[in-house]
Image: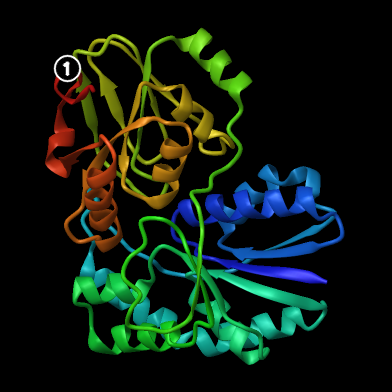
Amino acid sequence: MYEVWYVSSHGFGHITRCIAQIEKKLEIDKSYNYIIICGENQINFTEIYLQKYLDRVILRKTLTDIGLINKVNSLEVDKEKLESELKIFINSWDSLIKEELEFLKNYEIGDIFCDISPIGILVSKKLSKKTNLISNFTWYQQYKYLKLNNYIIEKYLELDRLIDNLYVYPLKLDFSYINPRIIEMDFICRKIDNKKIQEIKEKYGQSIFISCGKSAQLEKITIKNFKGIVFTTSGINVENKDGIVVKLPLDILDTQNYIAASEFVISKAGWGTVAECIRSRRKMVLLERDGVLEDTHTINELKKISNIKSVKFEDLIELDYLQIKF
């Protein structure tokens, strides 16, 4: 029996929170197998991360989502390009579903879980399975907030109305517009290794962590008045005027340990990174993105319950450590 996971191919936050759950299940129940379906880059990452379980995990590369598209060297959403890509994607749903059904007929399928991939929702219905969505938001909510084309909004609203079981993470948006069965989830992230954290601290000393997500491409971020180490991920060019920059490799598997080893984290307010900060008790400086409902909601909710700071995108041109430190 195979449990199937359709995961958004937008960025890496969706896949990392899903494999955190799948890894835990693999450890607990050795009789169950999994099929994970996502984009090529995400599946390549998953193949390395779950390598010791590959006898029980089938990985399939396919486009499962569009998500958001940013303008060049910016975190601002490119609405025109996004609408164009979404219309093409929506028109491909029938052919994509046909391909998925052809693939899945070779396996005995149990539950199907979707981390906001439209393909997973539609496959579930075609196979007469319960639609299990696991997320803190949906694309319908985000696209409505962006005031995209009505055709796109209606298509994604139709998907949300198909949800039977909604597994919601903390910091969730308002789902009162639909009526699924609600199951509350806790913060989850990949395993945090205390030994590795200590090794990072001993090797590098004082550090901060900067990430805008692997789906971002930004021109440059400058940090001044910080003599320690700045850890960065792909997609951003960071200058540390008074210290050192360590760029973590694209295929690194444990950014959560570098987050946990850092004094604080400067990041997009993506749920996955926020969860890793909360689980490792790291302070956060989150980037405000006016066009992104999930990020805006997350920042506002965190400010009610936690000591976080937020900065605007234009502040990234030159960040003063002495002004943003806690």
Residue at the spot 15% in from the left edge and 33% down from the top edge:
317
Q: Secondary structure at mark 1?
A: helix
Residue at the spot 60% in from the left edge and 89% down from the top edge:
125
Please identify the quadrant where the C terminus is shown: top left
Q: Residue 206 location in percent, x, y?
A: 38, 12
Q: Residue 173 location in percent, x, y?
A: 32, 66
Q: Residue 286 location in percent, x, y?
A: 26, 41
Name the image quarter holding residue 234.
top left
When the figure is inspected, residue 150 is found, relative to residue 231, above or below; the finding is below
Tell me if 159 is positioned left or right of 175 in this view: right
- The residue closer to the viewer here, 164 or 264, is 164
User: Is there any visible trace of residue 299 in the rendered image?
Assistant: yes
Residue at the spot 22% in from the left edge and 51% down from the top edge:
300
Q: Residue 116 location in percent, x, y?
A: 47, 70
Residue topped by disc 1: 322
Tell me if 145 is positioned left or right of 133 in this view: left
Q: Residues within 10 Å of mark 1 (few under 14, many from 20)?
A: few
What amino acid is found at the position of numbered circle 1 in the picture?
Answer: Leu
Please identify the quadrant where the N terminus is shown: bottom right
Tell me if 1 is positioned left or right of 67 in this view: right
When the figure is inspected, residue 244 is found, relative to residue 60, above or below; the finding is above
Question: How does the figure colour the protein chain or chains?
Answer: rainbow
Residue at the spot 43% in from the left edge and 79% down from the top edge:
89
User: Is there any visible trace of residue 63 in the rendered image?
Assistant: no
When the figure is inspected, residue 65 is found, relative to residue 260, above or below; the finding is below
In this rendering, the count of numbered labels is 1
Name the image quarter holding residue 124.
bottom right
